[in-house]
């Protein structure tokens, strides 16, 4: 009987140690641009392999719950994605490097942004050489006849 109690006690101790190791910890930090040190507003922070994630606030600050060994991915449009493995730090500050090659693939349209590969409509470009010399009351009247359909 005494041996059974000791074995049950040891099993409970091991299970509680495993449970303690799997507890999540709140990590805080700041995401900034490496070139100028400015905070990045709205950067995405995702814990890979889970549905946990957040984004940075106006000052580039964030906080997310992670477990030991989780990989945290930091990403933002126009910057290189960075992955950091969590190893019991309470604060993880990240500096993202600008990636000019990804900016070439984005087209700004009147109602948002789209990737160049997803763009299906026609885009025309009008130079302002003659538009400011046309006597009209509205800008859209000056564009009449300037762009092919």
Image (cartoon, rainbow, N blue to C red):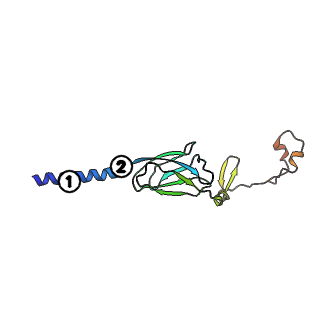
Q: CA distance from mark 1 to mark 2?
A: 20 Å
Q: Residue at x 85, y 45 (%)?
A: 142
For residue 130, which numbered disc appears in the image? none
> As rendered, which of 89 and 107 lies closer to the eye?
89
Number of other residues with Cα within 10 Å of mark 2, as a class: few under 14, some 14 to 19, many 20 or more: few
Q: Is residue 122 left or right of residue 1?
A: right
Where residue 118 sits: x, y (%)? 65, 57
Quarter of the rendering containing residue 75: bottom right
Task: Name the foreground residue: 89 vs 145.
Answer: 89
Instruction: Check the image and name the residue furthest to the top.
Output: 137
Which residue corresponds to the image point at 84% horizontal and 47% vertical from the top-left?
A: 144
- Residue 10: numbered disc: 1
Q: Residue furthest left?
A: 1
Question: Which one is in front, 24 or 106?
Answer: 24
Decide which of tag 1 and tag 2 comes sooner along the chain. 1
Q: What label sits on residue 23 in the rendered view? A: 2
């Amino acid at each position: 009987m005494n041996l059974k109690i000791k074995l049950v006690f040891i099993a409970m101790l091991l299970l509680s140690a495993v449970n303690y190791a799997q507890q999540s910890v709140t990590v805080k930090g700041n995401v900034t641009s490496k070139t100028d040190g400015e905070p990045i507003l709205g950067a995405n922070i995702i814990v890979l392999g889970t549905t946990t994630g957040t984004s940075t606030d106006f000052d580039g600050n964030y906080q997310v719950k992670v477990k030991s060994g989780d990989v945290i991915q930091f990403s933002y449009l126009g910057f290189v994605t960075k992955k950091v493995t969590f190893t019991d730090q309470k604060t993880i500050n990240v500096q993202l490097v600008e990636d000019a090659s990804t900016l070439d693939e984005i087209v700004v349209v009147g109602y948002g942004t789209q990737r160049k590969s997803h763009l299906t409509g026609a885009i025309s470009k009008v130079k302002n050489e003659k538009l400011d010399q046309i006597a009209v009351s509205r800008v859209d009247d000056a564009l009449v006849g300037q762009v092919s359909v």
